[in-house]
Amino acid sequence: APEWFDIGAPADFDDGEVAPVVADGIEIAVFRIGEDLFALRDKCTHGRTKLSDGFIEDDCIECPLHQGKFAIRTGEPMSEPVTKAVKVFPVRVVDGRVQVSTA
Ligand code: FES
């Protein structure tokens, strides 16, 4: 069974924003799009950059270093120079707490 890690309250994550968290020793970028939360590994697959330092546009996160884009919902690469998907972690809300699984 996956292990779940508490990363805060839903209100800690603002719509259309990204917040960096650490769960299980892993840096994770947490996004809210409307009511939905998404958790991506907080590292560009093209270089050593934190995606949480990037810019959100059209449900994508743009890497601050070379402007590669990833789809926030799927982690899929959406524009050059990124070609490799970034890992997406499961997120859930239980008893008013946001939890992420690093499995
Ligand atoms: Fe992210 Fe190059 S390090 S696009």
Image (cartoon, rainbow, N blue to C red):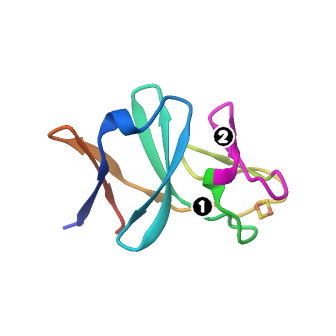
Residue behind label 2 places its C-beta within 8 angstroms of ligand 1: no
Query: Could you say which disc has been placed on residue 60 in the image?
Result: 2
Query: Could you say which disc has been placed on residue 96 in the image?
Result: none
Seen from this angle, which residue lies furthest top?
A: 34
Mark 2 or mark 1: name the one nearer the start of the chain: 2
Residue range corresponding to the magenta coloring:
53-67
Asked if residue 60 lies left or right of residue 20, the reply is right
Kindly identify which residue carries mark 1: 86
- Look at 47% across and 36% down and name the residue there: 32
Q: Is residue 35 visible?
A: yes
Please give the count of numbered marks on the rendered protein. 2
- Look at 57% across and 61% down and name the residue there: 42
The amino acid type of the residue labelled 1 equals: Val
**Quadrant (top left/top right/bottom left/bottom right) for the N terminus:** bottom left
Label 1 element class: loop
| x then y, percent, for residue 34 | 46, 25
Closer to the camera in the image, 19 or 40: 19
- Look at 62% across and 34% down and name the residue there: 59
